[in-house]
Image (spheres, rainbow, N blue to C red):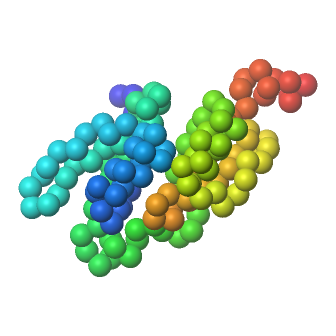
Amino acid sequence: MKQFIARIALVVNDYDEAIEFYTKKLNFSLVEDTSLGEGKRWVVVAPKEGDGNCSLVLAKADSAEQKSRVGNQTGGRVFLFLYTDDIARDYQKMTAKGINFKRLPEKMPYGTVAVFEDLYGNLWDLIQPIDEQQQQQQQQ
């Protein structure tokens, strides 16, 4: 059986503020927002022009332990990786929308990367990977 990661749960404080951030600031699509009763919802967002293979489930924290993890699901390490075909364009759009970058775009062996934080402080890498042609040139 072919396998792939389809969804990643992201613990949030509030469904609506998280939807607002991901759809307005990061320009993601709201894929699904279904009531599950008792205040719970199944909320899925994904990059608008992504391949559709992976999306985020915005999961509202409902216990003290879960609330303590909002914004720090990985102990301060980069948590999610958003690939782009034009980091300069996206960096400019994101900063104009108030996204806080912790590290400016920088060339790395695997591409150009910048680190930003989401509305809760989770760290993300924005990456423009080196395309195959550039990789071949580097290997020569």
Total marks placed: 0
Above or below, comparing residue 25 to residue 83 in the picture: below
Relative placement, left or right, of 16 versus 28 is left
Question: In the image as oriented, which residue stretches furthest toward the bottom?
Answer: 64
Question: In the image as oriented, which residue stretches furthest toward the right?
Answer: 140
**How far from the left and from the top, in percent, is residue 109?**
79, 42
Q: Quadrant of residue 54?
A: top left
Above or below, comparing residue 101 to residue 109 in the picture: below
**How far from the left and from the top, in percent, is residue 49?**
47, 28
Question: In the image as oriented, which residue stretches furthest toward the top?
Answer: 133
Residue 78 in view in this figure: no
**How far from the left and from the top, in percent, is residue 24?**
42, 45
What residue is rendered at 45% in x and 65% in y?
120
Q: Quadrant of the N terminus?
A: top left
Above or below, comparing residue 55 to residue 118 in the picture: above
Q: Quadrant of the C terminus?
A: top right
Q: Quadrant of residue 85?
A: top right
What residue is rendered at 46% in x and 60% in y?
119
Above or below, comparing residue 72 to residue 29 in the picture: below
What residue is rendered at 38% in x and 76% in y?
68
Question: In the image as oriented, which residue stretches furthest toward the front?
Answer: 96
**How far from the left and from the top, in percent, is residue 105?**
73, 48
Q: Quadrant of residue 116?
A: bottom right
Relative placement, left or right, of 52 versus 75 is left
Closest to the observer, 30 or 136: 30
Residue 67 in view in this figure: yes
What residue is rendered at 66% in x and 32% in y?
86
